[in-house]
Amino acid sequence: MTPKNKLKSHYEVIVIGAGPAGLAAARILKEAGKEVVILEKNKVIGKKVCAGGLTHKDLESGIPKDIISREFSSVLLHSHHKISRVRIEIPLAYTIDREVLGKWQYSIVKKLGVPLVTSTVIKVDQEKVYLNSGQEVSFDYLIGADGASSVVRRSLNLESKNLLVAFHYVVPKQMQDMELFVNVEKYGFTYLWIFPHQNFTSIGTGIDVTQRSKISDIKPKLEDFIKSKKIDLSKCQYESAPINYDYQGFEFGNMFLIGDAGGFTAPLTGEGIYNAIVTGEEVARKIIAPEYDTPKIQNILKYQNIQKRVLRLAQGMGNAADFFADAFMEVIHYRFVNKVAMDILKV
Ligand SMILES: Cc1cc2nc3c(=O)[nH]c(=O)nc-3n(C[C@H](O)[C@H](O)[C@H](O)COP(=O)(O)OP(=O)(O)OC[C@H]3O[C@@H](n4cnc5c(N)ncnc54)[C@H](O)[C@@H]3O)c2cc1C
């Protein structure tokens, strides 16, 4: 999919980045009659280092079931000493191919007539964006939807201290269960995931850079874990990318930050697709009606703060966190505990 649109010299709204956040924002703006353009550096829309895990809240945000890769009615949780299969009344989790998600979102904005131009933004200021082609384009409003290494965020001089780096191997094999592994003694304060798709499986983990953890501390352990599943590592593709959870505001005069660019990701789980879509839609509504008070962004921030506190608490426990993980496995089947866990994770 290679969009071939020509740029004008001025737009009412420029959106930088055609990820879930930028495409969601552009849709709402165009539906309200705004003149909007999307600038995207990649030729292929949707290609992104991501495990593609979703929960039912993502489907509530509008992602249709027919573009989902797999649906899971239960998830296998592994702690230090226990394995537990968790089920709730509704399907618990899903996976989606990010290119399929991007293609679906792009088809909607394309139908609405939003131009998407393949171009890399190298600099922005309060009036203009500057492209690698040498072209300059002015705007009334600018939305930074350009991910965890956002050019727009950098131009606002915002720090990005609260960072995760997530990495995975794309295993060319279908696996059965969605599985999560917590073992502080072995892997530190993180979790390993197995997220099966239709023709491949993402097996990965992440580190919290604020804890001075290094990829080299855990990558060999992830590799041993994969090899223990009798998977030939040389046939798997390794990918890694940062995840920003350092929220420092989303409205800066006529410039806005959404999704990973705004640091909206969930710090405990690393989930960002839902938060990207919802913050994109909310900021678009704010541009359309400046008095709009973005309740869904406030909700995302509330759960981000809860997750931050749980993460810091667990990090403060040392290896004792394994004891709590084991105890949690013991009681997860009780409806009340189940509900509290779902609330914290906001699935
Ligand atoms: C290994 C890993 C696993 C993950 N697993 C999950 C998961 O299972 N579930 C989940 O919900 N989330 C997951 N995430 C997080 C999720 O991928 C992100 O939160 C989500 O993609 C954020 O969407 P976004 O639209 O804000 O940014 P992105 O998806 O990063 O999109 C940003 C877009 O901007 C473009 N861009 C960047 N810079 C420029 C520029 N200068 N000029 C023009 N275009 C530019 C990029 O090409 C890209 O298309 C994972 C992340 C990683 C790294």
Image (cartoon, rainbow, N blue to C red):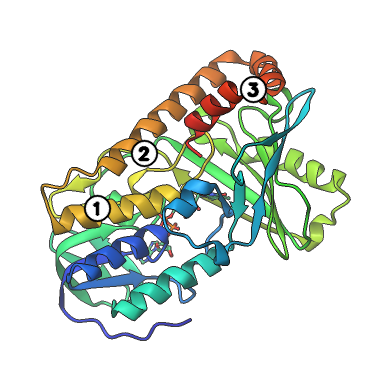
Mark 1 or mark 3, whichever is nearer to me: 3
Q: Which residue is drawn at 80% across and 60% down?
A: 234
Q: Please state which amino acid type lies under the numbered disc 3.
A: Tyr
Q: Residue furthest right?
A: 230
For image coordinates 68% across by 39% down, the residue present is 192
Instruction: Name the residue that disc number 1 marks.
Output: 283
Q: Which residue is drawn at 54% across and 38% down?
A: 269
Relative to 203, is 274 on the left or the right? left
Q: Which mark is residue 170?
A: none
Q: Earlier in the sequence, mark 1 or mark 2?
A: 1
The quarter holding residue 314 reads top right
- Labelled disc at residue 300: 2
Q: How far apart are marks 1 and 3 (CA)?
A: 38 Å
- Alpha-carbon span between mark 1 and mark 2: 13 Å
| Amino acid carrying mark 2 in the image | Ile
Image-based side of 177 in relation to 295, left or right? right
Q: Residue 334 carries which label?
A: 3
Q: Sequence-wise, which precedes: disc 1 or disc 3?
A: 1
Separation of residues labelled 2 and 3 (CA atoms): 26 Å
Under circle 2, the secondary element is helix
